[in-house]
Amino acid sequence: MTNAYEEWVGRVEARTQRLDATVVQAMAATLDLDSAPGDGAPLPPGWQWLYFNPTARRSGLGTDGHPQRGGFLPPIELPRRMWAGSRVRYLADLPIGAEATRHSRILKVENKVGKRGSLWFVTVEHTTVCDGTACIVEEQDIVYREATPVGATPAATPEPYAGQARWGHDVIPDTTLLFRYSALTFNGHRIHYDQAYARNEEGYPDLVVHGPLTATLLQQLALAHGEGRALASFEFRGVSPLFVSRSFRVEGHTNEDGSLALWARGPDGELAMSATATLR
């Protein structure tokens, strides 16, 4: 297939923002933490996703709640768009309260065919710089999919994940958690707050838990078992969706090489997200 979006490869944009401590406080409250780091403290891993998000006008949104196609990202017309995974390197602390710039570049646009039809993958590299120092470099994978046909046969129930956890805890994702995280990330995707849309238009049984929210919880888990060290890298891949009010577990263990194997296990034991972290 001819790549109709090849001209988007190499496109760049930059966004500059102060890493406001009030946003950090709001995130800590959303995650029900006892306290929040203040100005000058390192921004926790995953919390960079609270910043540098597009602020499209309401009239500039598509029916799914995302900004309309085109602009920086290619105008791929497939209706379902989601964040499939990322590979993140934490090179230096990003201080809360500082001004930082995120430089973004489209690395590749690829078409593949899956069990449910055509898929487009867009990989974007984000480099976050503060005071001339590159603090975070991330490769983010965005996938565009065809709509699930009305009355389509549900996917087979996945087998329980066989990973052996040494530590972990339960998470109950209520509607308030999903609402607050959508607000903090300025994420208008309706699958996270509009139950009728999620069910009738995108074929989900209920509201969907944000992938980066689950990835943030896994990074918190890594830090809790990292013996006081900071994250050097974190890689995650979404496998199957998690849904509101259905308890799931974030779990992990330490590998022989010192890296951390992490995952989120759905309510039926299925693998929802897999991840790997290294420490510095």
Image (cartoon, rainbow, N blue to C red):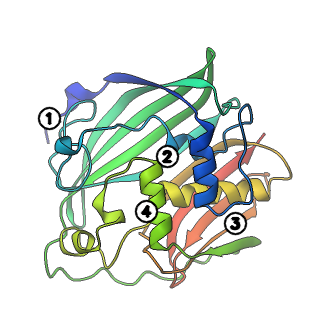
Q: Given the image, on which type of amino acid does mark 4 rest? A: Phe
Q: Which residue is mark 4?
A: 179
User: 114 left or right of 39?
Assistant: left
CB of mark 4 within 8 Å of CB of mark 1?
Answer: no
- Dot 3 or dot 1: first in sequence order is 1
Q: Which residue is mark 3?
A: 252
Which disc is residue 95 wearing?
none
- Dot 3 or dot 2: first in sequence order is 2
Image position, residue 196 (x, y; %):
23, 74
**Residue at screen point 41% across, 38% down:** 53
Judge by depth and name the residue closer to the eye, 27 or 45: 27
Q: Given the image, on which type of amino acid does mark 1 rest? A: Ala
CB of mark 3 within 8 Å of CB of mark 1?
Answer: no
Distance in Å between CA atoms under marks 4 and 2? 23 Å
Secondary structure state at the residue bearing disc 2: strand
Q: Which residue is mark 2?
A: 86
